[in-house]
Image: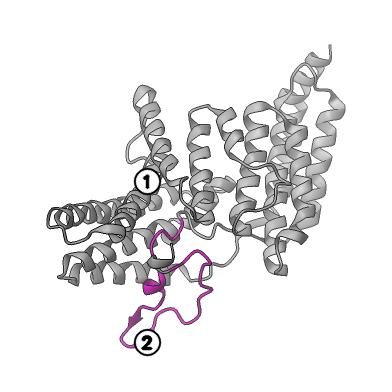
Amino acid sequence: MIKEALRTMLFGGFVLLFAAQSSTAGQVKWKLAAPAVRAETVDVVADELVADARRATEPLTRFERLLVAANWMLSYQLEPMATRMLLRTAEQEDADRAREVIDRATELLVSAAEVWSQLESADVVDGYEHFVRGEQLESISAFCRAFAVIWPARPLAGDDREEQLRMAASKLGVVLESDRPNVVALATLWQSYLFHERGEIDRCLDLLPPVLRPFDGQEVDGLWLRIMRCRYLAQAQGQYTAAIASLIRADTQCDIWFSQEAMRVRARNVISLVRRQILMQWAAQGGESAADEGVTWCMEAVDRIDEQFQDREIELLRLRGAAPAIVDLGAAIKLSAGGVPIIQAYDKPADVEPVGDQ
């Protein structure tokens, strides 16, 4: 009886209720916070790096600059599309733009691999330097392969899709052996996403840390790992109560996790958006255990979120980069055009380190 009543609400009057809530949410503009570097500047840096790599005549220098250019693109050019995808606020042109960046980075990595093969044959690089350079190429390529599967150039289906997802996840598994927390965090984030796409939710949850576990590394990376755990709990296992409770805990922890007020606010905004999305999903799900009161509770909670943010632009915390800085991106940050720094002020990522310190 309860199930039938709920079905009537979900597919009858609830449609109107859903529309009303969507309309209310439409008065809230969720948007990514301004990046540390303007998008056009990020693109200029990418072009400068590619030109710099092409000008290099010495093979090792060319190899290094190709890696820097590819890493920059996958970190900063891809970041807006990656953040919006995880937030489920993707824009219409995001997929095409992501593929453009990935295709360009792939070309650079293919060229880098060819140069690296020549260097190995000539025994130009040996010892620890050889190990570091090879590991850098392998790690950046692993992220690029993962992104190429997430934003494929052609639709993937059936066994082909399963194999591509499996191989991409396997390549990122190697990166998880890194001793750099930021590298491990983003490898974990994207490997869990690939597992989710394969329907391996238990593996996702095994990878991702519980909300209250202390951070190992940078707070932005840590927050995103916990956000995605909550999303997977709700989406695949139907543990809506656990997901909502975890998000509420995450909100209270922001005072501890983030020392800067602006970061704290943006982090809480992300939590609110994801909580709203999960509540809507929960209300629409229905089932034997659902009751009219449960749907009403969810929608009232959605109302409270909408009222809190109504008629305002809400800034959302973005990924620091879609991929980590595997190589030293300091060279990119310091680039100049015509003698004038093209990046006047840049909050240097904590993970940008000289190669010798990795």
**Residue shown at 71% from the left, 67% from the top:** 259
Q: Please give the range of residues in magenta.
A: 324-353
Residue 143 horizontal/vertical position (percent): 40, 48
- As drawn, the label of residue 330 is none
Residue neighbourhood size for the residue with mark 2, other residues' Cα within 10 Å, grouped as few (<14), some (14–19), many (≥20): few
Q: Is residue 253 left or right of residue 209?
A: right
Identified by mark 2, the residue type is Val
Give yes or no for residue 317 being in the magenta stretch: no
Give yes or no for residue 347 being in the magenta stretch: yes
Q: Is residue 76 left or right of residue 47?
A: right
What secondary structure predominates along the stretch shown in magenta?
loop
In primary-sequence order, the first of circles 1 and 2 is 1
Q: What residue sits right under mark 2 in the picture?
A: 340
Q: Residue 210 lies in what quarter of the image? A: top right
**Residue shown at 31% from the left, 59% from the top:** 128
Q: What residue sits right under mark 1 in the picture?
A: 142
Residue neighbourhood size for the residue with mark 1, other residues' Cα within 10 Å, grouped as few (<14), some (14–19), many (≥20): many
**Residue shown at 56% from the left, 31% from the top:** 203
Q: Where, quadrant-wise, is the N terminus in this rendering?
A: top right
Q: In this orientation, does residue 147 appear?
A: yes
Seen from this angle, which residue lies furthest right? 293
Residue 285 horizontal/vertical position (percent): 70, 26
Seen from this angle, which residue lies furthest front? 127
